[in-house]
Amino acid sequence: MKKQHFLLRTDGTRHVMHPVKVFDSPEALKAFTSKLGWRVFRELAEPACPMDIARKLGVHEQKVYYYIRKFKQAGLIREAGLESRGGATARFYQARYNSFSVSLGEPPAGRELNISSPAHLKLLKPFVEDGNLNAKIIVGSPDPHGPWKARASDSCCAIDFALFMGAFTSGRQAPNYSLDTEVRERDLRGNLILIGGPTVNMVTRRINNILPVFIDLRGNAKIRSSLSGRAYKDDEVGMVVIVDNPWDRKRGSKILVIAGNRFQGTRSAILAWIKSLDKIMAGNIHDRKAIAKVVRGYDMDGDGVIDTPEILE
């Protein structure tokens, strides 16, 4: 993949990225060293014709064309269109980048920022739209509830999930979650994100049987895939599934289910969402149209906490 460079602007609350052209030598920027060259280039922030630029700046047209040629040779501008004028053709140009940088080589190791990218934003639709979380997160109640009188311990895993999703949203809207015991029928419309399996999250229980990858509650609970026909019973196995919302089909709403056989499996699934979102959205290996992944987590650094996900199917 071609490396891209961005300029990060922040005011403490918002982060905005702009593409930036990086040079390994200042030679390409020589055209900027003259005051007139810089004035001409600034006019190219929007599509502009050399004739119009010359008239606006009060200089001879040939001087503008001189800099246009320099900018083209350096790859700083592109042709932006043609216009017929009095039997002649006027050619318009525009700057490829609004920001530039000169690199002195690879920068020293620094803090890695989880900044939202257009690719990730596209993958996160419809759950993230226009910088906002466009879904309700539903987690299991920590109190004994449901047929199994289970206490949900998956909610703490949702913190990592929320931190990741927060990198793509403003984070200003609230509340963003509900306990499964608080959900009423009217709350089931729209996009939903369900954290936890059917024994601890009663909303997950209601759709468990229609999922292409689900938790089989007969006997010892285990994740079963109707796509591969396989069953996975280890505690560290989890699942990530996206399906149409059966309670809101008219609007085309979606449901994201992140769950596991046990707490460890849910953590594995959340790590897969965070670290391998592109692979998850590529679909199941047995049916690429089905966003239904089975994952397994590993403790690679030996500290007793799962830190590395592996996608099984």
Image (cartoon, helix red, strand yellow):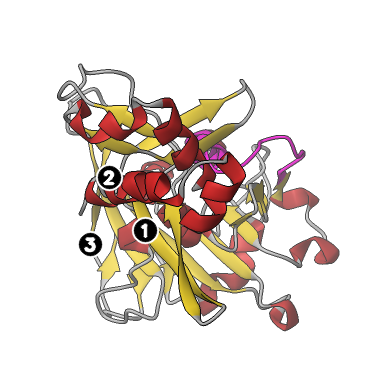
162 versus 75 height, above or below: above
At label 1, the amino acid type is Arg
Q: Is residue 2 left or right of residue 210?
A: left
Q: Which residue is mark 2?
A: 70
Q: Residue at x 75, y 39 (%)?
A: 173
50 versus 282 height, above or below: above
Q: Which residue is mark 1?
A: 78
Q: Which residue is mark 3?
A: 312
**Separation of marks 3 and 2 at Cα, in angstroms:** 54 Å
Residue 110 percent across, percent down from the top left: 28, 18
Instruction: Assess disc 3: are there few (<14), some (14-19) or many (≥20) residues with their C-alpha within 10 Å of its C-alpha.
Output: some
Does 168 lie within the magenta span?
Answer: yes
Q: Is residue 114 left or right of residue 138?
A: left
Q: Nearer the viewer, mark 1 or mark 2?
A: 2
Q: Is residue 100 left or right of residue 51?
A: left
First reached walking from the N terminus: tag 3 or tag 2: 2
Please, what secondary structure does the residue beneath circle 3 have?
A: loop
Please, what secondary structure does the residue beneath circle 1 have?
A: strand
The C terminus is located in which quarter? bottom left
Does 173 lie within the magenta span?
Answer: yes
The quarter of the displayed image where residue 176 is located:
top right
Q: Quick check: can you spot residue 114?
A: no
Q: Residue at x 18, y 25 (%)?
A: 302
